[in-house]
Image (cartoon, helix red, strand yellow):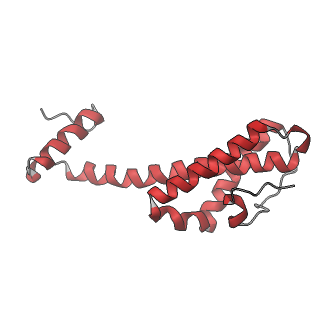
């Protein structure tokens, strides 16, 4: 057995799981297991940030291109809100992330880049003009 972490992370993970289940704790690759456990949390935060940036970008498009509003944008806004809610319900420790000012600033920057790339709009707000409650409110659309 003994696949290394560097050569095949999936085979390595399966081996580590088998060792854990067999109670062979002394044979575990503790350092890399710790890294992977930390990465799970980072991955969950990236997922949340990605969905929030897409949601915010579509809210921006909705607000600043009213002539282009359509069912597709509305569906994307709805889907991202549902996915964000489900993600936070499934990983409750992410809830404080939604109100973290530093995280929100990064996500807003991502949303601005998405909206600018998709629309060519340049004069978008430097900070999110909507409250946290409005952003996730299933019925809110900026007019």
User: Looking at the image, which is closer to me, 74 or 11?
Assistant: 74
Q: Quadrant of residue 121?
A: top right
User: Looking at the image, which is closer to me, 30 or 19?
Assistant: 19
Residue at left 91%, top 40%? 67
Q: How many marks?
A: 0
Answer left or right for 75 relative to 33: right
Give coordinates of residue 32: x percent, y percent: 27, 48
Residue at left 82%, top 47%? 62
Give coordinates of residue 38: x percent, y percent: 36, 55
Is 114 situated above or below 34? Answer: above
Answer left or right for 105 relative to 65: left
Residue at left 49%, top 62%? 94
Residue at left 70%, top 59%? 135
The outermost residue toward the front is 139
Give coordinates of residue 118: x percent, y percent: 77, 36
| Placement of the C terminus among the 4 image quadrants | bottom right
User: Looking at the image, which is closer to me, 65 or 124?
Assistant: 65
Is 27 situated above or below 99? Answer: above
| Placement of the N terminus among the 4 image quadrants | top left
Answer left or right for 119 relative to 45: right
Give coordinates of residue 6: x percent, y percent: 28, 36
């Amino acid at each position: 057995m003994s696949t290394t972490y560097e050569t095949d992370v999936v085979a390595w993970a399966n081996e580590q799981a088998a060792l854990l289940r067999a109670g062979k704790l002394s044979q575990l690759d503790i350092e890399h297991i710790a890294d992977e456990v930390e990465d799970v949390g980072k991955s969950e935060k990236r997922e949340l940030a990605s969905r929030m940036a897409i949601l915010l970008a579509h809210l921006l498009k909705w607000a600043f291109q009213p002539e282009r509003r359509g069912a597709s944008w509305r569906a994307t806004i709805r889907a991202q809100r549902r996915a964000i809610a489900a993600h936070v319900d499934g990983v409750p420790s992410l809830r404080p992330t939604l109100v973290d000012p530093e995280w929100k600033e990064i996500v807003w920057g991502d949303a601005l880049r998405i909206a600018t790339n998709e629309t060519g709009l340049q004069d978008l707000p430097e900070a999110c003009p909507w409250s946290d409650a409005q952003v996730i409110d299933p019925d809110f659309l900026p007019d």
